[in-house]
Image (cartoon, grey):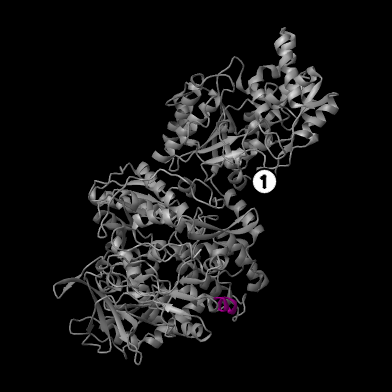
Amino acid sequence: MKKAYKAPVLDGSLSIPQIYDWHRKHNTNHPIMLYYVVDGGAGKNIALTYGHVVPAAHEAGRYISRLTGVPIDPSVTPKPVIAIMATSDSVKLFTIVLGMMRAGFLAYLISPRNSPVAIAHLLSVKQARHFILSSEPHIQQLAREATEELKNSKGIEMGVFPMPHFEDLYHCAPEVVPAEGPSTFDPLPERVDSLDDAMFIVHSSGSTAFPKPVAWSSYMQLQWVEFKFSCLREVTSRAAISPFDWCAEVLSIHGWPMYHIAALYIATGAILAVFPPAIPAVIATPKSTYQGMVDTGATSVFAVPSNLETWTKDPVKVDHLRRMKAVYYAAAPIQKDVGDHLVHVGVRLYNEYGLSEVSVISDYLSGKPYIPFFQCFCLNLHVIFHHRWLQSEEWKIQNCLQKIPSYDIALSNMTYEGCDAYATKDLFEPHPTREGLWRLVGRLDDQIMLSTGEKTNPGPLGKQTILRGHPMVKDSLIFGRGHFQNGILVAPKDEYRFDPQDTEKFNAFREAIWPTVEKMNAYAPSHSRLVKEMILVEDPKRPFQFNTKGAPRRSVVLAEYDTDIEALYATVEASSVPDINIPAEWTPESTYDFVKQLVHSVMRLKVNAEQDFFQYGCDSLQATWIRNALMKALHSAKLLPQDAELPSNIIYDHPTLDSLAKTVLQVASLRSSETVKVFGEKDLLEYVERYTAALPKEVVLLTGSTGSLGTALLARLVATDSVSKIYAFNRPSSKRTIDRQRESLKLRGYDENIATSPKVVFVDGTLTTDGINVGDKSLEDEIRSSITHIIHNAWRVDWKLSLNTFQDCVEGVLGLTKFALSSPRQVIPRLLFASSIAVLRNDHTDVALELPIVDPKVPLGQGYAESKWASESILYAAQERTHLRPIIVRIGQISGGVNGAWNQSDWVPAIVKSSVTLGCFPMLKGICSWLGVEDMAGALVDARNSEHSTLHLLHHRPMPWDVLAQVCAKELSLTLVPYSQWFAKLKASVEHEVDAARRKALPAGMLLEFLEANLHSTDAEGVETFGFTRISVDKMLEVSHTLREAKPIGAEDVRLWLSFWKSTGFL
């Protein structure tokens, strides 16, 4: 792989998107990303190459254009800004960002860690009018609050759009990616961007009241590569060959945004290991990131310090880190004892340093010998640094980076010697003996870097108007550098001073200022919020020292209180618990109430029994608070030994009130944390059952309930606990619909009382291009306002009719689309369309995947197939242009029901009856992927909430045709003959004996064209009979437990069909 890789030329002739297009041509099969999936019970790594990613990025550019209505026009300047806020997986988010760069859009990446007011500010300042969001509830809620703020404060309306799915971009499921990317694709229009043109926008953490947007150009990204070479702008050609050979090395960046490490694979051939694409995205925890690193076989890793600190507690994990080529940490300092231990045991630990405004400026990929000073780093030699020694603290400097021809910066906050420059406001100290090594020790503006990588700016929180506005407070300092959460040291005004050892006065003071601290919390990002237990009060014997401007001398004061601060962290870690009464008796009810109050108090948001904390905004800090509080409560109640701890992942493994309360009760009952169950496969399945059981009740509009499949669907929906009502929608008839339904149920072996279930409401009406027409507007409004799902099953079935004959059917799909979109509900009803595998009639690929069919030639030649394809296309278009999320299920051959009932008009019964008349039955070597109507209906109901837009429904364990032939021959006393001989006899009988009785006895004679086509199809073992291509059902198997558990059709089923046909007089 290393030998095949070609490094790009970095002479300024190619922008970042153009380099990717170049890679697809020259490094088509070289992997960019790697992720681990479990497919069919077996784990495997999936590699996405340039051949996969670049076409998908071009598709993403077009998708975003269609979604937002922003045209792709290379001549438009400035580039349109489209904001994105997501917790989406790295693969999908990066593909979208690359596609937007290639299409000429500025992707504006907004962190969901911001407050709604801050997000509104970010959207306003860059004049963004389009906002793309991932589907997680807390993302949706945050966006609603931000857009409402924007509308109320500035009168700006935002267009809000859903993130595309992996399948929309790559046209395959994440676990079944082909070995190679598409050989051809439709590229976006060519565009020429200079190296200085903005490519995407990030934002700072906010050193003032709000974060600042920071636009990155191609040159800014390529500077990462340039660190290894001489000046990029001054060379005519420079290949990106790093002194440290990264080519084909697997670097784990699980939990890191890919665009943060862009140059690594743009230029060096490194392979980035990431989480698999998933909805919702995999949560980056110490456990999941470590497992992802191991599963993908990563040789190096980028990690946030808090993860390293957790891993260090496990000798097995430490040993794994020791065997890696490099372990990089960034975004925050690491605890010294942790770093010392890792280096001592042989871990090659590197510190990366950079800023959004100026890129990475530490020299961490140079290939130089490893220096075991993990807190220090070298500053890059190609960057001009101006060291500004601070007069008040002579041992510290602040670096200023100057913009020069060989080094660009994204943002300037000063000028130096006539050039734009950026003063970092970071404080460094030189290594006492190793020249050129520097250690980051603080911030000039007091910004605090937590061990999670998050940053807190205490200025806007404590030193300005909020807490100082309290009549009892003189000043305050927020602390937390290198720790998991922030705390605050408060200096009371002189008249309110007291000895903080006086518990009564301390508690009274804390309660008095707490409402003001709460106001600070409402203003702050979630990771910066304070808990009551993290408040320290000034000791009158050690008063704050102030400078000449009246501000506290931060470093001096915090140094004096360092022992108190560390003791507070130790105490809180061991005993932190909000002011919630611990149960006197640990019953299921009292335990649940305690857990509920605790979680609501920490999250500052109410969730119900089965709602996932993390889907509603819970972060790693809050999870730690909840765990610590639970331990304190159990220790206090003497239900957990003082030296025992709850598992570090307990909140991640049990992220609902119901699950967590049961786990806590288990610990309390057995008095041991060892009783906490390891979350395994069975638990996961049970969790899904509980989660889905707690969902709001569903109301379904079912079209076509009286036919074979419709009857089975009605029966299955009535039996589904989560469905509270079914509107059974049918065309009017001379006979009452309920009577027709009862007859159909009885005929097919169901309880006819299903028709009188209180869940069922029969509605007679027609579908129009505008919706439904039932002749009663109040009933229409009732259905519109209450349905959560539409299952569109009704369709005319006639193989000989032209497309125009199906016009009313196609218009009905359009009408149901409009009807769903007119719903007043917050979530638009899901629309499941029962399509047909007939749309694949001209598909000549090896395997037909569960993807949209773009080429109209595929269904061409049969009106029924064409009508289904046209309807699919309408739904795909609606998905791109609206919030509708349709589910298109292409169903295969439906076989008999619970009592063998199989429509006599179908082609299989026609062959059987005609064979009786001919006295012989055809032999074939192929297979039959038929699915019983009961399983067909169950699988369709299973799929009603699918995240996949396209599914195939047929049996994954097909029956050999020979089973059918042998049973029919035996039961009906028929001779087995080759198919060609049988067909010739049928054709001759139809052509020469034309009386009505004879034709009735030979119904297959009406299917001569269809049957004759099979003469020219491949007849072999493992090949579907009657000419169908091999059809993938991978996604449907993922979606439907009914299909997964469906038994193969066998001889007993065939005998049941024959018995039914005999009972009705058909045979």
Q: Examine the structure image and report whether residue 705 is included in the region drawn in magenta.
A: no
The reply, left or right, for residue 317 in relation to residue 482 is right
Q: Examine the structure image and report whether residue 318 is included in the region drawn in magenta.
A: yes
Q: Secondary structure at mark 1?
A: helix
| Residue 148 location (% of width, % of height) | 31, 50
Magenta region: which residues? 314-320
Q: Is residue 825 above or below residue 746?
A: below
Main secondary structure type of the part rendered in magenta: helix
Tell me which corner region of the image, top left, top right, bottom left or bottom right, holds residue 466.
bottom left
The reply, left or right, for residue 39 in relation to residue 808 is right
Q: How many neighbours does mark 1 have within 10 angstroms: few (below 14), some (14-19), or many (20 or more)?
A: some
Residue shown at 51% from the left, 73% from the top: 628
Residue shown at 51% from the left, 24% from the top: 809
Q: Is residue 271 above or below residue 440?
A: above
Residue shown at 25% from the left, 54% from the top: 124
Residue most toward the bottom?
A: 433
Q: Which residue lies under the disc numbered 1? A: 1044
Residue shown at 48% from the left, 82% from the top: 338
| Residue 977 location (% of width, % of height) | 80, 26
| Residue 46 location (% of width, % of height) | 55, 57
Is any part of residue 515 visible from this angle? no
Tell me which corner region of the image, top left, top right, bottom left or bottom right, holds residue 226.
bottom left
Amino acid type assigned to the residue bearing label 1 in the image: Arg
Q: Is residue 181 above or below residue 354?
A: above
- Give the quarter of the figure containing the C terminus: top right
